[in-house]
Amino acid sequence: MTDHDVDDEVADLLRQADQRYTSSRRRLVAALQAGDGPLTITQIVAADGSLPQSTVYRNLTVLEDAGVVTRIVTTDEFARYELAEHLTEHHHHLICSSCGDVTDFSLDTRTENSLDRALGRAAERFGFQVEAHRLDLLGICAMCG
């Protein structure tokens, strides 16, 4: 999806939530697009110094409620934020249980399809209908190891 397509989709999602795609929200989305993986609020503010922390916090809540942003909770005190998968691409996370760092990774199509089938079978046993999946691997990153 191009930056223009993302902006159009974000504007539509916000409109459906009775919200506007303000210049602050555009800059916030741009910071998340430019980031190398999920970002903390501090990292977002550092990426775009024109965004006050209070504005980032308030707008992340609106964007999350509208389905634009996904919040990733880690073992440290800082949540990370990224654009929702339908705006980017399907991926998974490596989450360090020591420092809280989050790294995105993708699986090849064959492995992803196999995982989908296995998760579907597991969900079926409980009468659960899968819409999508997220996979977070918890462990120790190379920097902490």
Image: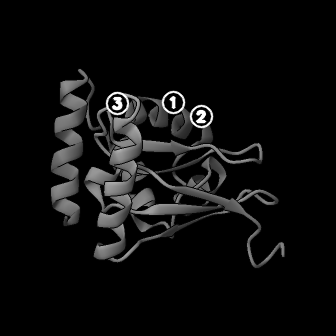
Reading the chain from its start, which is encountered first: label 2 or label 3? Answer: 2
Q: CA distance from mark 3 to mark 1?
A: 34 Å
| Residue on which disc 3 sits | 128
Circle 1/circle 2 CB separation < 8 Å: yes
Tell me: residue 80, above or below residue 61.
below
Distance CA(mark 2)–CA(mark 3): 39 Å
Residue 59 place in picture, x, y as percent = 45, 34
- The residue carrying pointer 2 sits among few (fewer than 14), some (14 to 19) or many (20 or more) residues within 10 Å by Cα, namely few
Secondary structure of the residue carrying tag 2 is helix
Q: Secondary structure at mark 1?
A: helix
For the question of whether residue 24 can be seen, the reply is no
Circle 1 crowding by C-alpha within 10 Å: few under 14, some 14–19, many from 20: few
What residue did someone put label 1 on?
Answer: 58
Percent position (x, y) of residue 116? 33, 56
Q: Amino acid at mark 2?
A: Ser
**Image position, residue 143 (x, y; %):** 79, 77
Query: Is residue 30 visible in this depiction of the protein?
Result: yes
